[in-house]
Amino acid sequence: MTLAKETLVEMYLRMNHARLFEEKVAWFFSRGMVHGTTHLSVGEEASGVASCMALEEGDLVSLTHRGHSQAVGFGLDINRMMAELLGKETGYCKGKGGSMHIADIESGNLGANGIVGGGFCISAGAALTQQYKKTGKVVLCFAGDGATNEGSFHEALNLASIWKLPVIFFIENNLYAMSTPIEKHMNIQDIADRAKSYGIPGIVVDGNDPLEIYETVAKAAQEVRKGKGPVLIESKTYRWLGHSKSDAQAYRTKEELAEWKLKDPIKRLRNFMIDNKMMTAEEMDKLEEQAKQNIEAAVKFASDSPEPPIESVLEDVYA
Amino acid sequence: MTLAKETLVEMYLRMNHARLFEEKVAWFFSRGMVHGTTHLSVGEEASGVASCMALEEGDLVSLTHRGHSQAVGFGLDINRMMAELLGKETGYCKGKGGSMHIADIESGNLGANGIVGGGFCISAGAALTQQYKKTGKVVLCFAGDGATNEGSFHEALNLASIWKLPVIFFIENNLYAMSTPIEKHMNIQDIADRAKSYGIPGIVVDGNDPLEIYETVAKAAQEVRKGKGPVLIESKTYRWLGHSKSDAQAYRTKEELAEWKLKDPIKRLRNFMIDNKMMTAEEMDKLEEQAKQNIEAAVKFASDSPEPPIESVLEDVYA
Amino acid sequence: MEMKEMTYKDAIKLAMSEEMRKDENIIFIGEDIGLYGGAFGVSVGMFEEFGEERVRDTPISEAVIAGAAAGAAATGLRPICEMMFGDFITIAMDNLVNQAAKMRYMFGGKAKVPMTMRLPFGSGTGAAAQHTQSLEAWLCHVPGLKVVSASTPAEAKGLLKAAIRDDNPVCFIEHKLLYKMKGEVPVDDEYIVPLGVSDVKREGTDVTIVSYGTMLYRVLEAAEAVAKEGISVEVIDPRTLYPMDTATIIESVKKTGRAIVVHEACKTGGLGGEIAAAISESEAFDFLDAPVLRLGGLDTPIPYNRNLEAAAIPTVDKIKDAIYKVMNR
Amino acid sequence: MEMKEMTYKDAIKLAMSEEMRKDENIIFIGEDIGLYGGAFGVSVGMFEEFGEERVRDTPISEAVIAGAAAGAAATGLRPICEMMFGDFITIAMDNLVNQAAKMRYMFGGKAKVPMTMRLPFGSGTGAAAQHTQSLEAWLCHVPGLKVVSASTPAEAKGLLKAAIRDDNPVCFIEHKLLYKMKGEVPVDDEYIVPLGVSDVKREGTDVTIVSYGTMLYRVLEAAEAVAKEGISVEVIDPRTLYPMDTATIIESVKKTGRAIVVHEACKTGGLGGEIAAAISESEAFDFLDAPVLRLGGLDTPIPYNRNLEAAAIPTVDKIKDAIYKVMNR
Ligand SMILES: Cc1ncc(C[n+]2csc(CCOP(=O)(O)OP(=O)(O)O)c2C)c(N)n1
Ligand SMILES: Cc1ncc(C[n+]2csc(CCOP(=O)(O)OP(=O)(O)O)c2C)c(N)n1
Ligand SMILES: [Mg+2]
Ligand SMILES: [Mg+2]
């Protein structure tokens, strides 16, 4: 599969948006400018972005608590994302959701989820809608390695399998569930093997290789769209930062982290595009610069946006 | 593995007890003499009885809603079981539990369970006690094919695997979950394959062959006792009667049922013992007669037992 | 209005079927609801009429029943779910409470989750502690959910249709002992009983009793009994338990000056406290001649033994005693 | 009594650690409670002291945390569990409610299930709708469970030790905003605060306010404020929410003639109704000069935005208004 240059350019831009967005969010938090907590996906941008970009218009996604890259990858507006982080009225959830609930059902984003594994069942249901209405669309359901130990993983994959629902379960295996290394939370090498319990395909991809991810998801989506039932994809990657706001990271070594930093998915895509003469280094620099400006604009948009009116606390409980 | 004659005699007696017990229960129900509902395991006696008999003194069991054969197999007193069915004070639960909750924690019976899949997590916990206290005992956890689709199956097997808990998950696959044939509730041939999700052994046995069951459980228990972690055993069998009190059984054919009746596990053990000259036909007849008398005695014991006093409704909520 | 006699469960089936005929976005999912027709036979024949695309047997997986319904509802379907027993909602609570009920609010009003979760509650069946609970109070503490309880066949039809048409997750409580109850049911396929409207089931002047489900019938029986002794009982069925139309109740209490709440659920933590407190903190307080009394199930699990089981929940005699108690002040 | 100043969360750790030193049947299980020390750092250092056999990180599997604890408890251990956030109990409800709580009763009194489930509840952390709930009312509707809420560091120690020593499943509610609160804590390792005893946190004569958790502090602040205006508020913390010592509350109301219940949980379906109804149906009714008022959280999920979040639960001003309201009658 050779990807069009525009696709790669867009991918690169989104991956940069994702990283810069999160760096900005981290800065806000460190300044106490936003409250709550947040889970950053720095280092995992290929998983979140390239997978979403392999979707078609009208396909749906369900995101995790570590969902910024996924949201940016799906094409959400970084202005409204940033506004949501700042709790503003112009945010995707009018300031009611925050980092863990960024959603935009209209465009097919079923929401980030504060419940680990919370997206599995919802995605099965959204896929049922696609199947029932014969939309030809698929649902891409994100989850972490730790999330696959929730009962909801099992129930949802089994249901999706027997009903042949058009859903791709995309596991971002970053080797840790919070502080718990994967060897301590499951007794198998590849999460993809869990597909065998449901008689569906299970595929492992290099989670830091945007092209492999794109290709795998695109292929899987093709099969899934044909009505062949769900696919489980395991994307092996790594998170560079702590689990959430406060994390001393005693559970991992600096060496391990350093090693993974060498596999930076953003650099990788940059080098690929330059090496393949699709773009010059200068052109790539410009893209990065553009990404920075976009993020600054998002910050400005968010900062300038109004707080939601207090009365809105009572709104939106019922339709 | 050659089993001692006494073991087989006891096994045969218990399998007969199980069947006769349930036939009596069915009769009670048809007469409106007991209320509630009940799930009979006629046809599955080898699974319930032979598996339990492969345990050692002090091992534990967790039973299902279809638990009479399992309870009898574990050596529970049929008098007190019958009394419980009749809601009497002398019943295992003083009349508070009924068919779905027959339990006797003291002897290691963690209880039948009205929640499908309710035993998985409890068994993991009971196995943790054995491991932690180094008792050398194992837990035999029964469940149906349908139960393996509950999230609790997944969570419990994963935990048991990573903690190497001494528990055998024994699935009585009788091909149906209530009215739902297994092909419609899971997309794989062998439930034993689900073991792969947890990196533990998964074994299929002929659920109507008491000797194979005994041998398999005994071997598994040996390994499990050594601290090698849990084992999943799938026992393929069939229930002869309806799912519960009222079931028109439109979901299966008479032919299928007739075919399985030919595989009667009780007849099979009888023939084995006669063919191997361990017992004569007359001796086997006598055993059957004894079983009948024991059941009649149980009915008399239960019928003669007092109702629990009304005040007892308020007792036993808290320790 | 043209009426037809039918059972409560047939009225439920009728409501589902009529709505499914009108709106093909409605699907019905649950365990053994297809060919088998559900554990209580509610849906017998629906599989044959609507086919396996719309009447879907699920594996024994209550979490995904609720979660898939939420996901389907958020994307354009209108699922009806059946929990085989309401007790199993314990397995579905995350998807119901943390997902379905909160989606709209968390997402700033931009989701719509039109799903109906049918929940057979209640004891009297000898099914013991794990199959007999009345857990409506939990659900009435979850903003975003609506909770409905139908007491008659006609209301079963009308309220369930309203629930299915509602754009929010609605928990629809059915009491198992009512399934076989017969009553006149409007045949009009636009017959709706609106959510959020309490119903005066019996008019009276001396004491107001609020009740629902099977307890309602015991209350009515007690009311008839004491009527002969000259005590006039007004009986109100809230029907929608959350958010509840308390105005009708409060008006009644202002008239009668006395109130009792009767439910089968365990007394402590049950809806009785909520209703009693709502009455007391309303303008009805000044009209109260006696404290609002609550009569609920014992604070125990439901036992198996028939006599113990019967002793665990309010009886007609206990209700009469409660009436005497509030009248004697 | 020798005292030492420490935080609420250190008092919780101390209670667990002291009990674990005394009784090796106690184990501690939960997500990231080991090396990481728990999401709120409550158990930092316990892994080092007790080792991985006794301080056990689990996978993200809340159902089996509760269920394994129940199974372990029924067979001789005394597990303490930590739900990382109390909100996730939605996933554990079946094992907690249908198994742990009912085992003893269903089995005719022949099981003992000594487990403690620690539940961090409450808002104020900006963590939005799925990480901020106060779900104690659900648990107080489940016979077989006990429910405890600690408001001070000393009580956190004493009540948690009592919970661990109790032979029943106990849900131990911790409010996240209290974790960093400091207070004097008895060092005696036999210091216990018995379950089932309400505590008068402040004496007064004009109005009784029942509250617990962080709301207690707002109530005390409001009480100080109105004291300057000559209104004397008695404040009662039930501490054990279920089964609750209502006698202490009722005695107080007989004295003051006025009562308010304040909690953070959504008002409708919250414990306020239960407590208000219990007061009203007691002999305190005849002493009531005003209806029992309830002040609870709004009937909405908790929003993310800081100001909205603050607006969703009772404030000192709202509590003062409630006091004025009951006094003005
Ligand atoms: C049901 C539930 N349990 C626990 C948590 C707390 N929690 C949030 S993120 C997290 C770790 C998730 O690990 P994983 O699924 O691997 O995703 P990652 O954070 O590594 O992206 C935990 C335990 C939660 N939010 N929801
Ligand atoms: C959690 C839960 N869901 C549903 C039920 C209702 N129910 C009781 S038995 C049963 C079928 C169980 O099937 P399986 O596990 O295969 O066991 P079998 O009855 O075939 O022995 C169902 C759906 C239940 N008791 N508990
Ligand atoms: Mg992870
Ligand atoms: Mg089966």
Image: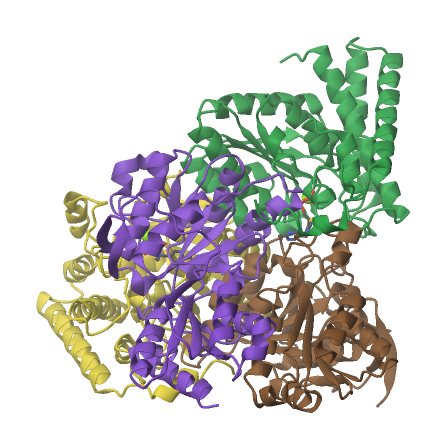
Chain colours: A green, B yellow, C purple, D brown
- In this view, the residue in front, A227 or C236, is C236
Q: Where is residue D97 in the image (x, y as percent from the top left)?
A: 50, 67
Q: Position of residue D107 (x, y in %)?
A: 41, 76
Q: Is residue B285 left or right of residue D109?
A: left
Residue B220 seen anywhere in this rendered image of the structure: no
In the image, is residue D163 above or below residue B285? below
- In this view, the residue in front, B170 or A92, is A92
* Residue D322: quadrant of the picture: bottom right
Q: Is residue B89 left or right of residue C135?
A: left
Which residue ends up furthest to the left in the rendered image?
B282
Q: Is residue C105 left or right of residue B7?
A: right
- In this view, the residue in front, B210 or C74, is C74
Q: Is residue D170 left or right of residue A231?
A: right
Q: Where is residue D26 in the image (x, y as percent from the top left)?
A: 64, 74
Kindly identify the residue that appears in the image at 8 percent across and 69 percent down: B282
Residue C235 seen anywhere in this rendered image of the structure: yes
Q: Where is residue C241 in the image (x, y as percent from the top left)?
A: 48, 61
Kindly identify the residue that appears in the image at 44 percent across and 36 percent down: A161
Kindly identify the residue that appears in the image at 79 percent across and 52 percent down: D306
In the image, is residue C68 above or below residue C292? above
* Residue D313: quadrant of the picture: bottom right
